[in-house]
Amino acid sequence: MEMVDGHQMVLSLMACALVASGVSRLVTRPLYAGLAEAQRSRLPR
């Protein structure tokens, strides 16, 4: 709230962050699960 210097934009910024989080979950897979899968694929069997 200090960054916007007022309470008028707080709700719209929170809504924007929520929408952005939802879109990123739809577009990409979770980061740590993808990294773990890549790491497991490099291990010898």
Image (cartoon, grey):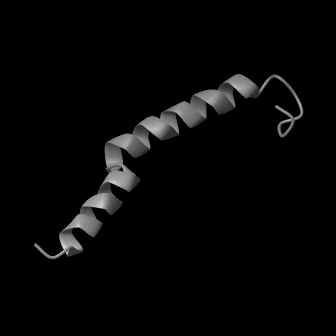
Residue at point 32%, 52% (across, down): 33
Residue at point 19%, 69% (across, down): 41
**In the figure, is residue 5 to the left or right of 41?**
right
Residue 20, percent from left and from top: 50, 40
Classify residue 13 by image quadrant: top right
Residue 40, percent from left and from top: 23, 65
Q: Residue furthest left?
A: 45
Classify residue 17 by image quadrant: top right
Classify residue 43 by image quadrant: bottom left
Q: Nearer the viewer, residue 2 or 34?
A: 34
Residue 15, percent from left and from top: 59, 27
Residue 37, percent from left and from top: 25, 60
Residue at point 36%, 49% (across, down): 30
**In the figure, is residue 37 to the left or right of 30?**
left
Image quarter in which the C terminus is found: bottom left
Q: How many marks?
A: 0
Q: Nearer the viewer, residue 23 or 34?
A: 34
Image quarter in which the N terminus is found: top right
Residue at point 89%, 34% (across, down): 5
Q: Nearer the viewer, residue 39 or 34?
A: 39
Q: Nearer the viewer, residue 45 or 18?
A: 45
**In the figure, is residue 9 to the left or right of 35?**
right
Residue 31 versus residue 21 in the image, above or below = below
